[in-house]
Image: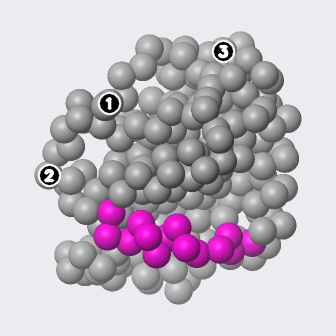
Amino acid sequence: MLDDKWKPDSAMAELSRFWDNIADKYASQPVADEDAYQTKLKVTRTYFTPESEVLEFGCGTGSTAIAHAPFVKHIRAIDFSARMLEIARSKAEAAGTANVTFERADIIALDAADGSFDAVLGLSVLHLLKNRDEVIAKVYRLLKPGGVFVTSTACLGDTMPMRLFGAIAPIGRAFGLLPQINVMTHESLLRAFTDAGFDIVHNWRPGKGKAVFVIGRKPG
């Protein structure tokens, strides 16, 4: 099993435990905005072909990877929560999905050659990363020329209450009540994409306070 090859450091192991503990509750929750979710799926698929090799990092319980599977050749779906992946594999088996590989791994340490993927998905995850810019740079390298990075990201820094939340969030993390939270703005997210070399080809926010849906294309 590929999971056994990944040896998380202490900080990553702590995050893994947090998401393991809430995985079953997370899996039982409905999509917060079903219409927006379906729109994001449809837009994403316009960048797929039947030969697309796709990576999804932070795949959670696998619902999006399984939904996209019929439209691509293969999806390599990674997460650092063993319990999330256990649920994802059960969902894939129930759906009869055979072209998604679920793997316990960290995007930064991922064993994959540069230029391996036609598309990379990072959905509801960038705002949970301390090393956002490093991850975006890694995604850029992993993409083939012309490949796309698809994200849906909570930009919590766009409102004053959430900026204040960012100041107290470390206390919640210290007690194991909250994960790592990056209180970024919409503007800073777009700038991180362009600084990494991406061209922004899609930029949509379905409503005030909603997650920002951004697609960046690697030139070529």
Q: Main secondary structure of the magenta part?
A: helix
* Callout 3 crowding tier (Cα within 10 Å): few <14, some 14–19, many ≥20: some
* Callout 2 crowding tier (Cα within 10 Å): few <14, some 14–19, many ≥20: few
Front in this rendered view, residue 36 or 4: 4
Q: Tell me residue 59's x, y (percent).
A: 51, 48
Residue for badge 1: 2
In the rendered image, the vertical position of residue 82 relative to residue 50, given as above or below:
below
Q: Residue at horizontal 80%, vertical 23%?
A: 49
Q: Amino acid at mark 2?
A: Ser
- Is residue 119 visible in this depiction of the protein? yes
Q: Quadrant of the C terminus?
A: top right
Q: Tell me residue 9's x, y (percent).
A: 16, 45
The picture quadrant where one finds residue 118 is top right
Q: Tell me residue 172's x, y (percent).
A: 29, 80
Sooner in the amino-acid sequence: mark 3 or mark 2? 2
| Span colored in magenta | 20-33
Residue for badge 2: 10
Front in this rendered view, residue 65 or 163: 65
Residue for badge 3: 145
Cα–Cα gap, marks 3 and 2: 35 Å
In the rendered image, the vertical position of residue 58 relative to residue 157, given as above or below:
above
